[in-house]
Structures are given as structure tokens and as C-alpha cells.
Amino acid sequence: MSGTTVEVDWRGRLVDAYVPERLVAGGQLAMATVRATARAEGSLAGMGDRLGGLEVPARLLLRAEGIASSRIEGVDAPLDAVAVASADDMVGGDAGWVADNLRAVDAALAHRGRLRAADIKQWHRLLMVHSDLEPIHIGAWRDRIGWVGGPSPLHAVHVASPPQMLDALMRDLITYANSAADDPVTQAALVHAQFETIHPFADGNGRIGRILIGWVLCRRLQLAVAPPVSIAFARDIGGYLSTLTLYRQTGPDPWVRWFAEAVDDCASRVAWTLSAIAELEASWPQRLVGVRRDATARKLLPHLVAHPALDVATAATLVGASEQAARVALIELVDRGVLREVVTAVRTERPGRPRRWWVAGELLDLLSR
């Protein structure tokens, strides 16, 4: 992989912007890299088999992916607050922004048709609901210089292609993403790296680029859910960033090999995550020794994996109880160590007194490991 540079004006000074070559099938890959992609594809197939029919745990993996992807970009919030924001779209701040990432992931993985520029722009709109980006830049290719690293393009690690080239570059990327020119793992790696190189949006490129990984893998391998690759990336952020840089400087091989190994590791860890979720869920009834079989607290237990954040109204609706009974049940579950009340301040855009929320804290904690 190589590209060219073109001079662009930035505030009266010329800087070199990088223009990548068009995406083509990955014939430049070493045999060791090809073997790594094959191992990763096998691990993904095994992950898909383990997740077969497990819709709720699969959605928890999406939550883990969205949270980790946001953290890579420095957008962080307490897990409890993010869980509340995922259940209440009126919650703002960093928690709301992370929840927006989860909604964008959901939308992307629900789309199994051919990829269009309009799809990517819509995911960007979902991602940027709680951002302070100017509306003109939301869901639209950037109209200014973009760069990575450094306070300005004069000292940046990478200056992306000029805005007038974005339409053509993105058309090429989308054409490749819709093809089957390479194996699924190589294709996902190249789509992500090329997207990061093009950097088509004014903000949010990293998160949208990682969403594209999931879209490619799910579409090509018929997975119910993509592996939470951002967790693997966050464990080796240096390797992630350095091999993306090598993609531009020396070619795709180092990046595709690193990517394949990260995906392989991530897919293999899914078995541990599913086992941990099942073990935790099985422990909850055991904590309610002495509580009546028909108690509202017991009736809530089967709903906690699908609804890890609850307020009184939601809990009452789930089990068909009164709000008074639901409130008593939530407090009982806190006393028994199943839930914890959210004590972190959650900024909401709804007027009036803030609602009280409870979360399945241990479940949220294990998803971040």
C-alpha cells in the first residue's frame, strides 16, 4: 500500500496531505498474515456457534464494543451512567455520548444490505446526537482539512486527503466493502484502515471506522453480532495506532496481521464472557434465600440481563406490578447484592426531578474486562 501527497493550504501555509491508493484485493500479504486471518475467521465461526440463539448476551457484547470504542477516543463515563443513558435518551454528557455510540453500533449491525454513503452518514448522525460538533458537519463529509495527532496539521502524525477528494475515495471504499474480493477478516481490516486514512468526517472517524469492522464481519460471516474488537484494540493501543501508521507507510501486511491476531483473541474471549454472564445470572436466585417465590424481586431477575438499568416505572412494567411493589423489589435486590443504585450524577435534558435508577452492577463490570 502506498499513496501520494498533495499540497493543501492551511491558514496560509502549505502542508502535505496524504491520498491513499484505491483498495484492491490483499495480494501483498505474507503467508504468515494469511494464516493469521484464517485463524481469526475460524475463531469468529466458533464464536458465532456459541452465540447461536443467545440474543440477549449477544446484545451485551455490542454494549461492550460501544463503550470500549468510545474509550479509545477519550470519551469515557461511569458504566452505571452509560447504562442509564442507554435506557433513557434524554441523558446527556459523556454518558449520553457513549450511549449514542451504542445506538450507532445497533443501527449498523441491523443493516445487512449493501453499504451506501447514506448509511455511513446516518450512523454518524446517531453517533453525534450529544456532540458539540456544528450541525453542518454532522452526517456529512468534512469540508476542511482533517488530521490525526498534534494540535494542527503542521505537526500532525497524519494529514488526511483534501475534502474535494472525499467523494471519490469513499465511493471506492464502499465498492470494496460491498465486494468479496478478500476473505472477511482481511476485508474488515482494510476497510477500517482505509476509512481511518481517508478520515472523511470532522469528528467521530475512529468510532465509525470500528463500526465498519463489525458491519463487514457480520455481513460476510452471517454473525448475529460482531466481536467487541475495540476491547482488544484498547488493550494494545500502541499496536493499534502504530500498525495503522505502517499501513500508510509500508503497506497493509503489518496492520492486517495485527488486526487478525486481535480479532482472534477477541473472538476466543467471548466464550469466557458468555460463561461469566451465565454464572452471574445463576447466582442471583441463590441470593434471594428467604424471599417468597412469587415476590416481585424474584420476577425481576430474568429481565436483568436484557435490562441492566431499571427505574421504578420500567421495573413495574416488566413484571406487571405496581410501582410501589417495584420500588420495594429494587431496594430488596440492592440489599441482596444483585443491583446497585446509581449514585453518579446523571445529567438529563428532562426538566423536573431526576428519576432514580438501579443497575446490575456486576454484569456491567464484567463487560468492561
Image: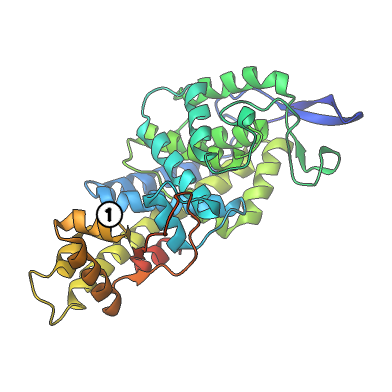
The outermost residue toward the right is 12
- Residue 290, by quadrant, is bottom left
The outermost residue toward the front is 352
Residue located 14% across and 56% down the image: 320
Callout 1: helix, strand or loop? Answer: loop
Residue located 18% across and 69% down the image: 297
Q: Nearer the viewer, residue 119 or 98?
A: 98
Which amino acid is tagged 1? Answer: Ala
Q: Position of residue 96 (x, y in %)?
A: 49, 50
Residue located 75% across and 46% down the image: 149
Residue highlighted by disc 1: 306
Left or right of 296 in this view: 6: right
Query: Relative to 244, does residue 118 appear above or below in the rendering?
Result: above
Left or right of 345 in this view: 60: left
Query: Relative to 225, does residue 166 appear above or below in the rendering?
Result: above
Query: Relative to 263, does residue 354 appear above or below in the rendering?
Result: below
Q: Position of residue 274 (x, y in %)?
A: 31, 59
- Residue 304, by quadrant, is bottom left
Q: Position of residue 280 (x, y in %)?
A: 28, 69
Query: Relative to 177, does residue 341 appear above or below in the rendering?
Result: below
